[in-house]
């Protein structure tokens, strides 16, 4: 059997860990020996994920955060630094999508929310991560972007703009902070079977649903564990020469 990527003892903070890709990643990393703090807006769900990890004998803690608030993000990082004794890996995964709409019909609040959570929220967390990691020998920041950050996403223009922005932040930080030994990489999933995507599917007719499910050459949605296992590899020492990269997890959609 091939041994799993080793994250034993890694001190990891993950945002958006109460649901979907974030919850699967938090629990996988903890099951492989990482010490994990989850930050999420959804308090009840976040507590449940932490409890699930604890009941399995792992170290998983939860703290409520709204990543759109720079102050709350600073408090989250202060909590994680104290609880874990430092931070080796930060996974910026919290995100939202919006009601699909052609660009001229997109509502202001949808545009603003996507930029506030997906782009400014990631910047808040990158800034806090750099502040924690730079004086302590470095670390690794993993941003969860999307293939919508690499190509067009018709009727999801604000989401696409926010994710393109995340990749810009990732690549720029990778160069700015290489000297401080902080690496930055992004993962770009296509449609993954999570509450976010189920919510979108519920708003579409049969034809629209099939176009999403069959968008990948593999003709199916991705599974959360297919993203969390890649994140676990990135979080391990095995990714040590990867910096400034945005890689796809899309069943071949971008090929
Ligand atoms: N599911 C997909 O198909 C897909 C594809 C590409 C990228 N992504 C990205 O993956 C990430 C996770 O998505 P998911 O599909 O697991 O969605 P999800 O809705 O299951 O989980 C998102 C989590 O982010 C949290 N969140 C939202 N706003 C927040 C805020 N302001 N502060 C703190 N937490 C907040 C939510 O409470 C939730 O727990 C997102 O960044 C998303 O854009 C998802």
Image: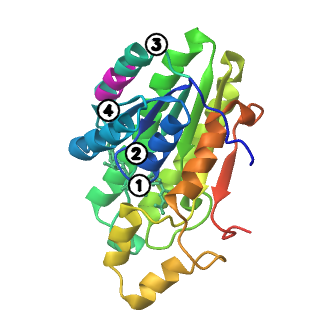
Q: What residue sits 51% from the left and 21% below the top?
A: 87
Q: Is residue 23 left or right of residue 72?
A: right
**Which residue is depicted at the point 34% across and 25% down?**
76
Q: Residue at x 54, y 30 (%)?
A: 33
- Whole-percent x and y of residue 193? 46, 66
The residue that disc 2 covers is 94
Label 2 – label 1 distance at C-alpha: 10 Å
Q: Nearer the viewer, mark 2 or mark 1?
A: 1
Tell me which numbered mark, 1 or 3, is placed earlier along the sequence.
Answer: 1
In the image, taking residue 248 as reference, residue 99 lies left or right, namely left
The tag on residue 62 is 4
Whether disc 1's CB lies below 8 Å from ligand 1 is answered yes
Q: Is residue 33 positioned above or below 81 on the image?
A: below
In x, y percent, where is residue 242? 74, 37
Alpha-carbon span between mark 1 and mark 3: 27 Å
Query: Tags 4 and 3 in contact by the CB under 8 Å rule?
Result: no
Q: Point out which mark residue 85 bears.
A: 3
Residue 243: image x %, image y %? 71, 35
Kind of element beneath mark 2: loop
Q: Residue sitting at 28 percent across and 43 percent down? A: 48
């Amino acid at each position: 059997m091939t041994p799993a990527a080793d994250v034993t003892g890694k001190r990891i903070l993950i945002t958006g860990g109460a649901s979907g890709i974030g919850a699967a990643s938090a629990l996988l990393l903890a099951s492989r020996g990482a010490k994990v703090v989850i930050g999420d807006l959804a308090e009840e769900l976040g507590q449940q994920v932490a409890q699930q990890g604890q009941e399995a004998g792992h170290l998983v803690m939860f703290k409520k955060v709204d990543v759109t608030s720079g102050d709350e993000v600073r408090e989250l990082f202060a909590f994680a630094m104290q609880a874990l004794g430092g931070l080796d890996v930060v996974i910026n995964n919290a995100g939202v999508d919006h009601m699909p709409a052609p660009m001229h019909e997109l509502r202001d609040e949808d545009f603003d929310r996507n930029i506030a959570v997906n782009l400014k929220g990631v910047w808040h967390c990158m800034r806090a991560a750099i502040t924690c990691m730079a004086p302590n020998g470095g670390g690794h920041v993993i941003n969860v972007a999307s293939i919508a950050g690499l190509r067009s996403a018709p009727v999801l223009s604000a989401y696409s703009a926010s994710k393109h922005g995340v990749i810009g932040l990732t690549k720029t930080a990778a160069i700015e902070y290489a000297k401080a030994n902080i690496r930055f990489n992004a993962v770009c999933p296509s449609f993954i079977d999570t509450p976010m995507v189920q919510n979108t599917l519920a708003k579409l007719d049969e034809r629209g649903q099939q176009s999403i499910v069959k968008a990948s050459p593999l003709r199916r949605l991705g599974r959360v564990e297919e993203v969390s296992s890649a994140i676990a590899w990135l979080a391990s020492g095995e990714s040590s020469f990867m910096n400034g990269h945005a890689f796809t997890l899309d069943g071949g959609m971008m090929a």
